[in-house]
Image (cartoon, rainbow, N blue to C red):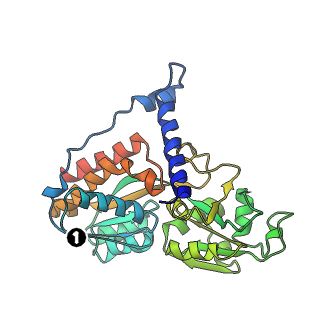
Amino acid sequence: MTKTRWLMLLCLVCVFGVGAMAQEATPEMTPEATQEVEATPVLLDAIDPFDVSGNMVIAGSSTVNPLTQRMIDSFIDDGFIDTIVNEGGGTGAGFERFCISGETDIANASRAIRDSEIEACEANGRTPIEFRVGTDALAVVVTRENDFIEDLTLEELALAFSTAATWDEVREGFPNEPIFRYAAGVDSGTFDYFVEAVFDTDEAPLLESSNLQLSEDDNVLVRGVIGNPYAIGFFGFAYYVENVETLNAISINGVVPTEETTEDGTYPLARPLFIYSDADIMQEKPQVADFISYYLSNVNQYIISVGYFPASIEALNTAKQNWLEAIAR
């Protein structure tokens, strides 16, 4: 690991540590903070991966994919010897494979499942169960060769990804150079989230913008931004962490993404991360239930190093309770 990347991850760990220290604070804490301190994590029975057998197929969000892969790697390191396939393609495509074709056991998702997708699942005998696994801060990035952007307002961000043809149309003083846009593909939950947060669910301004490249492959977007000083792109924070030596993350409305700003909502582009499965799948394939239990019990050991932020204790408790109810059916 390079020194720069090590420092980046160290900063993330430090931020997380500060948040944890704040939760242990004093009698002067607010009632809301006191309630957060008193939350007790739900504990699931420990899973020994050495005792788990059977293959699994996972697909969906390219944002959640690196976190799920880290959990798969840990599961294997701890003794699991069979096969887990973990593929991308985007949140929407992942739900299609889970709900319609029924070819996957778990769906990675960077947004909550839609009513239409739930209906598609139920039409094929599956009832999707949601498991919150973390929080992502959507990173808006430029190459390090860009020397004029450090922060954008949400309004300027909307201009940069819609009607502005040149950078000086985004802000006076920016260069009179064309904007090159790199955005998540329409099958991606990242696309859905960005459109909702920046354009109030209207995707037309983004899709009709000039010099636009869409891709469900975040690495394609990374390479496009790195190669052009007048390019701008967005994707999950983990992909920024992986490329911190060549990319700069832009603060939005003056707020940088940290564990604290994503949890309290002050960073405008924070979003939850999920995996989904089904009670029948979990009972018919105990390896799926065991992996999800292992995932929920251990995810916070790895999530910061991947480049994301922990879900709250309450959110993880809800996910664990969903797991308990699924295996009890």
Does residue 220 appear anywhere in the picture? yes
Q: How many marks?
A: 1
Give above or below for 34 relative to 47: above
Would you say 39 lies left or right of 187 here?
left
Give residue 97's position: percent from left, percent from top.
Answer: 34, 75
Q: Is residue 200 visible?
A: no
Residue at screen point 75% across, 73% down: 163
* Residue type (three-letter) at the residue carrying disc 1: Thr
Quadrant for residue 183, please give it.
bottom right
Could you tell me which residue is drawn at 22 percent across and 55 percent down?
78
Does residue 152 lie above or below 120 as drawn? Answer: above
How crowded pointer 1 is (Cα within 10 Å; few <14, some 14-19, many 20+) is rated as few
Q: Which residue of the protein is positioned furthest toward the front in this rendering?
A: 3
In which quadrant of the rendered view does residue 234 lie?
A: bottom right
Residue 326 position in % (x across, y down): 23, 53
- Position of 205 with respect to 68 (left or right) is right
- x and y percentages locating residue 229 in the rendered image: 71, 72
Q: Which residue is mark 1?
A: 83
Q: Is residue 292 above or below residue 42?
A: below
- Work out whether 139 lies above or below 304: below
Q: Is residue 16 left or right of residue 161?
A: left
Q: Nearer the viewer, residue 304 or 121?
A: 304
The residue drawn where x is 45% and y is 32% is 36
Q: Residue furthest right?
A: 173
Where is residue 286 shown, x and y percent of the image? 16, 59
Q: Secondary structure at mark 1?
A: loop
